[in-house]
Image (tube, helix red, strand yellow):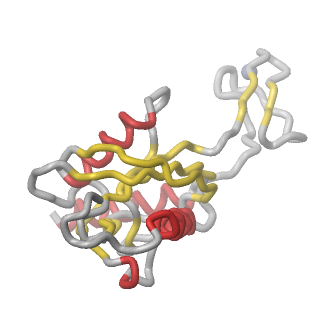
Amino acid sequence: MDGIRDWWEQRSEGQMTKYRRPPYPYCPWCAAPLPEEDPFRQECASCGFVLYHNSSPCVGAIPRDEYGRVLLARRAIDPYRGDWNTVGGFLRYGEDPIEGLKREVREELGVDCEVRDFILMGADTYGPDGPALLNAYFSVRLLSGRLRARDDIDACRWFAPDGLPDNIAFESDRQALRALFRKVKRPLGRGEEA
Ligand SMILES: [Zn+2]
């Protein structure tokens, strides 16, 4: 089993270090060399295909409980393995963002959620030299069920606003948490609706 895990970890790290920012050298359709003057819009002179480079859309869920605490997840994968971040991930091609958010919460925590408020959108990268991200954050209420960290995370924990961990993975996560706490102003008392 260790052999498989080592192989996977090496493979994961390899994928991160092999990431290349645009411009890309070849057309994905016909393999002709691409012009590199505009790294974010590359038009193939051979077949006419235009390769646009955009940030990858991601969604982050911030569950809150009746005490005003927020749930964060500990990353089990690179980048930022071992650091805490919001539950969420990459949207699939063409996926509705709210459906994607619910899917990610289900995949990582094993429970369904009710999406409450939009918090903010933040630009970030997936690791220091990683691809560009556009992260949309929402506060959510978790529906009943047994919380179970799985998929890309190995733990999840409730944190009070004044007791957040120092190692939060993404700058856009930190922005979203600050914005959320500004919006709610104060922790909710027991029994108040989150
Ligand atoms: Zn082409």
- Residue drawn at (77%, 15%) of the image: 47
In the displayed structure, would residue 141 be above or below residue 27? below
Q: Nearer the viewer, residue 90 or 33?
A: 90
Residue under the image location 45 percent in, 70 percent down: 80
Q: In the image, what residue occupies the spot 31% across and 58% down?
A: 63
Q: Note whether residue 170 is visible.
A: no
Left/right of residue 51 with respect to residue 178 in the rendered view: right
Q: Quarter of the picture for ligand 1?
A: top right
* Residue 88 percent location from the top left of the image: 38, 52
Query: In the displayed structure, would residue 129 be above or below residue 89?
Result: below
> In this image, 105 relative to 86: left or right?
left
Q: Quadrant of residue 45?
A: top right
Above/below status of 95 relative to 176: above
Q: How many numbered callouts?
A: 0
Percent from the top left, x then y, of residue 115? 35, 44
Q: Is residue 131 left or right of residue 40?
A: left
Q: Position of residue 177 (x, y in %)?
A: 47, 67
